[in-house]
Amino acid sequence: MTGIEIGIFAVVVLLVLILVGMPIGVAMLAVSFSGVSLIRNEGVAFRMAGSVARDSLQDYLFAVVPLFVLMGLLVTVSGVGKDTFDVFQSALRRVRAGLGIATVFANAVFASITGISIASASVFSRVAVPEMVRHGYHKGFATGVVAGSSVLGMLIPPSLLMIVYAVQAEESVGRMFLAGVGPGLLLSGLFVLTIFLMSHLRPTAVFTLEADQSDLPTLTAAQTARKALPIMALMGMVLGGLYGGFLNPTEAGAAGALGALFIALLRRSLGQGRLWQILVETGQITVSVLFLVMAASFFSRMLTMSGLPAALGETLLSGPIGPWGFLVIYLLVVILLGCIIDSISIMLILLPIAIPVARAAGFDMIWFGVMTVIAVEIGLLTPPFGLSVFTIKSAINDPGLPVGTIFRGALPFVGAMVAALVILVLFPAIATWLARI
């Protein structure tokens, strides 16, 4: 077989192994080793495996992964998410479907200090859904709002997916973080618009009865300040230091983790061995992510050696499909894979193939990264995988709430995300202007 044929065969075998249940990192290592052995020989495969293990994770940048994960977990247990929701709930108590809009805004703020969509989904399914249901909202709509707005955690910086993309594309993590601000605000606005239109055009899809928000608590200025101060201080420390140029991403992650630890200690949220549990969970998440990054580096080198990305780029870009046809196909593949594979794995499988083609097409790689992250996040809301949906189902633990109801509730927000992709194609500066300053 030629190198290109081996590359195609390797991609097919990898997808088959994943579908039959093999761990994705193990499957990528096995396929990559076998591919290099077929293209060259086993000696080269062993040497490449050793160099990948040595080179792929030694970058100082990777210290940012456990720091942001630790910050997100500490913030989650300290009750900051509930306080954020309370502030917006009080501010929007007189707005139609105000609780849904408050959930979106609270998720957007919470996303700016967690970077993990699943954390947002877990927190707000316990905080926002019961409150919405109690005030006359459909369970499907309430859970759909939480599922939809939880994806902001991977777009608004700091974002774990942005870090993964930056490493794969050899782009600046700081610039990728900056690039997520505009699209994050755009997506938040589209979610709010979706809720507004649904509440006026299809009220029966939103309310079981006319929502009564008259008994919502009204926070005084002092109460609002007390609840908002911790998260605002943490945002100022992390994002202010990052965007102001005082801190690099790793230093910002360290400052954020320290600030989140201080907040959790002040609120006495770390008793009964909870700090140890958080540290263990941080280690587990970090190791799984970095193992996937290492396996993806090996996979990327194997594909480059096979010549598949270069041949694919030449075929797609010189044929009738063209650059924009490639982009549409790529985004559709990402969304389809999101139905069965988790977000990070999708990026690590596809980016080694897609990035060379995107560069050859002349796309702005920061804009391409934002498009990739949004498409990947759509997969968190689509069946049968829908990780955010299953997280909400698990957190609520209500036998009377089928998973299908949550999927249907999230569908309008999938439409909003598709609209965001279209808008970013038409106006790419939304994603690039801040990152290029």
Image: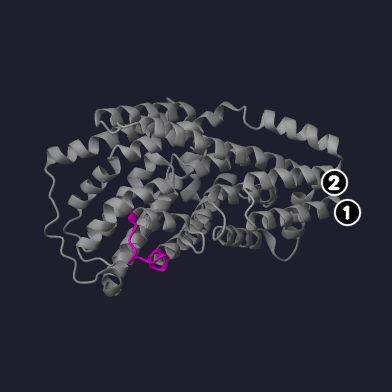
Other residues around mark 2 within 10 Å, as few (<14) / some (14–19) / many (≥20): some
Q: Position of residue 264 (x, y in %)?
A: 30, 31
Q: Nearer the viewer, residue 198 or 432?
A: 198
The residue sitting at 74% across, 50% down in the picture is: 309
Bounds of the magenta span? 396-410
Q: Which residue is mark 2?
A: 38
Quarter-of-image position of residue 56: top right
Residue 436 shows in this picture: no
User: Residue 414: where, in percent of width, then height?
Assistant: 44, 63
Q: Determine the residue positioned at 25% across, 31% down.
A: 268
Query: Is 61 drawn above or below residue 77 in the view shown?
Result: above
Q: Element at badge 1?
A: loop
Left or right of 324, for residue 244: left
Q: Where residue 396 is drawn, which disc sits there?
A: none
User: Do the residues under discs 2 and 1 have CB atoms within 8 angstroms?
Assistant: yes
Residue placed at 69% from the left, 64% from the top?
A: 321
Q: Position of residue 372 (x, y in %)?
A: 55, 52
Whether 427 is among the magenta residues is: no
Q: Circle 1 is placed at which residue position?
A: 1
Residue 308 in view in this figure: yes
Magenta region's main secondary structure? helix
Q: Secondary structure at mark 2?
A: helix
Q: Nearer the viewer, residue 330 or 267?
A: 267
Tell me the quarter of the image containing the N terminus.
bottom right
Q: CA distance from mark 2 to mark 1?
A: 9 Å
- Indicate which disc, 2 or 1, sits on the residue closer to the N terminus: 1
**345 displayed left or right of 92:** right
Q: Residue type at mark 2?
A: Leu
What kind of residue is marked 1? Met
